[in-house]
Image (cartoon, rainbow, N blue to C red):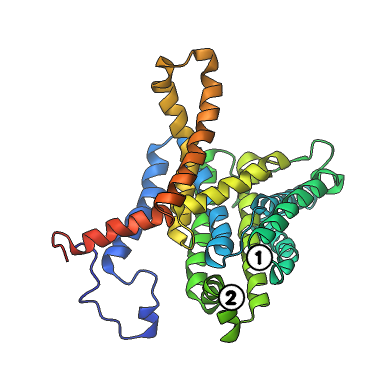
Amino acid sequence: MFHRESGYFKTTYQADMGLYPLPIARYAIVAIAALFFILLPAVLDGYYLSIINLVAIAIVGALGLNILVGFTGQISIGHAAFMSVGAYTAANLATKLDLPFWLTLPAGGAMAAFIGILVGIPSLRIKGLYLAIATLAAQFIIEWVINHTPTISGGVAASIEMPPPEFLGKELVNQAELYYFLMVIMVIALVGAMNLIRSRIGRSFIAIRDQEIAAEIIGINVFKTKLIAFAVSSFYAGVCGVMYTYYLGIANYENFQLITSIDYLAMIIIGGLGSVLGSVFGAFFITLLPFGVRIFMETVGVFFVEGVYLAQVIAQMRLIIFGGLIIFFLVVEPEGLNKLWQNIRNYFRVWPFSY
């Protein structure tokens, strides 16, 4: 009733390829843009804006991993390593060459894409669990190289202080100023991913994921397409690492360890593999989960746990809920939150009728 395609006719290929062909969809996008770019910055303080900033960063990283794992079917457990490549590349360029963010951001993504291509070369010969182990090895190798190369890591502490980004001569130092900076990058990454998946390259990704041999038979260059998938995914990861470094004000390898790769895998599994919107849902869910657990335990848990142990219980509860949700979605709804949203949307397409 509220979201119905009947009555809207398309007379050009351009109209048929529109991201949001229905008026209600365009109105919804305008409303969401007004919410995030006008209303929320006006009513929320710096703490809550910092949480939304984390969500925006996570969306970019989840989009990159979903392009590789969800759309192309190439398993990767080394996503955080490519984030660290982008982070340290941008930090070195910003501190040593004093380059602005509009150069360090794509440079970090490009360097991560180059490393991603090198890691993706074995993907022509290996797949599945073997490819996952190869990307896991890349995670440890890249981490070791960064930690033991002072020229890259900045010294024994493997930390480089990142100068704040500047826009029109003004430094973006607080969370409210960083909010628009990170949100604009996230929107560009989101629109780019949506258009990529609808392009010829994106359809090649999906063909390889569904049946690699059949894709090769119909003329798709499997090796080249896989390398493109690794490059695009790593580019997104590198940009995500640069965003996170600007957010924290420091590049540190401890923020890009294996647990971070697991977090992003959980985002796309819970949100929905092979779905751009699922990456957004998963990023929101996993990023907000620790804050939700903490609020719940501080409100309800104080009646069951002594105050001195509350912080330890909160940390453990996050891990328990985290693992339980992954198992739940893999068993009950493998297509994740995106599938649940599709079911709700399909219901209201015909509501109040049953057909």
Question: Above or below — where is 94 with respect to 254?
Answer: below
Name the disc covering residue 212, or none: 2
Calculate the distance from the C-alpha at mark 2 to the C-alpha at mark 1. Answer: 11 Å
Evaluate whether residue 169 shows in this view.
no
Residue 341 on image: x %, y %: 34, 55
Question: Above or below — where is 311 with respect to 318?
Answer: above
Q: Is the Cβ of the residue at disc 2 closer than 8 Å to that at disc 1?
A: yes
**How many numbered marks have been drawn onto this rendered protein structure?**
2
How many C-alpha atoms fall within 10 Å of the one at disc 2: few (<14), some, or many (≥20)? some
Residue 298 on image: x %, y %: 44, 22
How many C-alpha atoms fall within 10 Å of the one at disc 1: few (<14), some, or many (≥20)? some
Question: Above or below — where is 345 with respect to 12?
Answer: above
Question: In which quadrant of the rendered view does residue 208 lie?
Answer: bottom right
Q: Residue, x 69% and y 60% (percent of image)?
A: 130
Front one among 225 and 75: 75
Q: Which residue is mark 1?
A: 127
Q: Please indicate whether residue 65 sits to the left or right of residue 332 in the image.
A: right
Dot 1: element: loop
Q: Residue, x 39% and y 81% (percent of image)?
A: 14
